[in-house]
Amino acid sequence: MNTNAAKSFRDLIVWQKAHAFVLEVYRISENFPASERYGITSQLRRAAVSIAANIVEGFRKRGQADKLRYFNIAQGSADECLYFLILVHDLKFTETIQLQQQLDEVSRLLQAYMSAFEK
């Protein structure tokens, strides 16, 4: 993977997929119970946005250690999202299998992107 080819974070496939994931999280969470507006809805949305936002921040950092730190934070947010998707499914708010698959793709791409910097 040529990590120098991207001129903007928008050029990164991992960011594009993470952003699409955020949009889908917002779409499905609109239908969560109103009582969860400041609970699961807010937490899931925040964690989803954090994935894409930390990819953006990491992209801009110059040093390898700084880049990897932000990408690792994005990984943590992805794991947090996975838990919330499991919880939302178990609470029967909505089906989350497709979202979990989207998230898995983002996580795999993020790991590949990080591995390119570690070499």
Image (cartoon, rainbow, N blue to C red):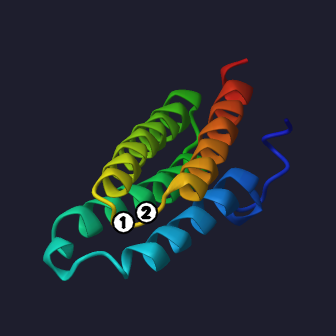
Q: Place residue 56 in its image quadrant.
A: bottom right
Above or below — where is 118 with respect to 76?
A: above
* Identity, as a three-letter code, of the amino acid under mark 1: Arg
Going by the image, does 51 lie left or right of 118? left
Q: Could you tell me which secondary element the residue under label 2 belongs to?
A: helix
Q: Where does residue 100 sit, x and y in percent of width and height?
A: 54, 49
Height in image: 63 above or below 59? above
Q: Which mark is residue 100?
A: none
- Residue 43 on image: x %, y %: 26, 60
Q: Residue at x 20, y 76 (%)?
A: 37
60 sits to left or right of 48? right
Which mark is drawn over residue 49?
Answer: 2
Pointers 2 and 1 in contact (C-beta within 8 Å): yes
Of the 4 image quadrants, the one containing the C terminus is top right
Three-letter code, disc 2: Val
Could you tell me which quadrant the N terminus lies in?
A: top right
Please give the residue where the numbered disc 1 appears in the rendered image: 45
Query: Residue 74, position in %: x, y?
Result: 47, 44
